[in-house]
Image (cartoon, rainbow, N blue to C red):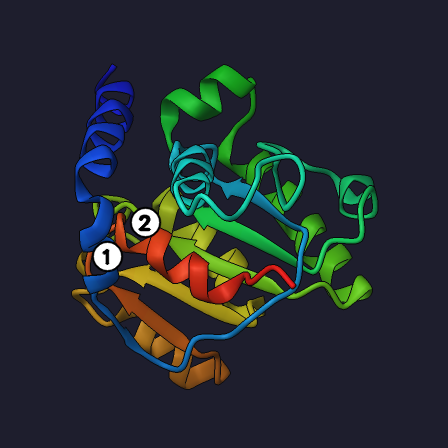
Amino acid sequence: MRKGFFILLLVALLSCIGPFSVFAAISGDPIKQYGLPFLITNAGQGPGGKMARLLVSQTKTLELDKDFFYLAEPVEADLKARPYKALMVVIGSSDKGLGASGITIDQEIARLQRIVKASKDMKLPIIAVLLEKDKRSNVATNPNERCIDTICPYAEWMIVVKDGNTDKRFDKIKEKYHIPLTIIDNAIDFTSLCKQIFIKK
């Protein structure tokens, strides 16, 4: 229920920001650019993937099911279904999401590992994204931290909301694995960022 309210609140905020989105706060490493189409998915069965889908749709330039696609639980074959130029993996685990899918976090991690391997074999770049500031923990075995460890070391780029990196967790991953890291102040800044990442030709 709380997650549904959060999504509705986000929709309301997006309807209000309009022209002010040009002032989105983005910092860190330079913005990378990718072609179209791209695939959005979840890591952890949380609501972040659907949130990203909504935020990308708000660009008004990128069209769902044409320029980008969303799959909650893709398997290896799904990555080959279209000529994807990037795989955007939105990190965030949810007990409710795992329960609805009828899987455990161990099964989810195993699925993600297969997706990472398939992406690497295909040379499909992975963009790791964290949009929810509460999807963090100081417990290494926490589902969210396990998802971070499964995805981020193999990503080509990380995009993280500022409040999700207060302990510099992603800075450490950047330094260890030499992966660019871009920070956004708020989740709604993701819309402005995507306008710069994915440009129609």
Residue 65 visible (yes or no): yes
Most foreground residue, 61 or 164: 61
Please name the residue shown 16% across and 65% down the image.
166
Residues packed near mark 1 inside 10 Å, few (<14), some (14 to 19) or many (20 plus): many
The type of residue carrying mark 2 is Leu
Q: Position of residue 37 (x, y in %)?
A: 68, 51
The quadrant where residue 132 appears:
top left
Most foreground residue, 16 or 170: 16
Residue beneath label 1, please?
A: 164
Closer to the N terminus: mark 1 or mark 2? 2
In the displayed structure, 201 sits above or below 156; it is above
- For the N terminus, the image quarter is top left
- For the C terminus, the image quarter is bottom right
The type of residue carrying mark 1 is Gly
Q: Position of residue 87 (x, y in %)?
A: 62, 54
In the displayed structure, 159 sits above or below 115; it is below
Disc 2 element: loop
Q: Is residue 85 left or right of residue 76?
A: left
Most foreground residue, 120 or 35: 35
Residues packed near mark 2 inside 10 Å, few (<14), some (14 to 19) or many (20 plus): many
Residue 141 visible (yes or no): no
Separation of marks 1 and 2 at Cα, in angstroms: 8 Å
Please name the residue shown 81% across and 64% down the image.
121
The answer to the question of whether label 1 and label 2 lie on touching residues, with beta carbons closer than 8 A, is yes
In the displayed structure, 63 sits above or below 32; it is above
Please name the residue shown 18% across and 44% down the image.
17
The numbered dot on residue 131 is 2
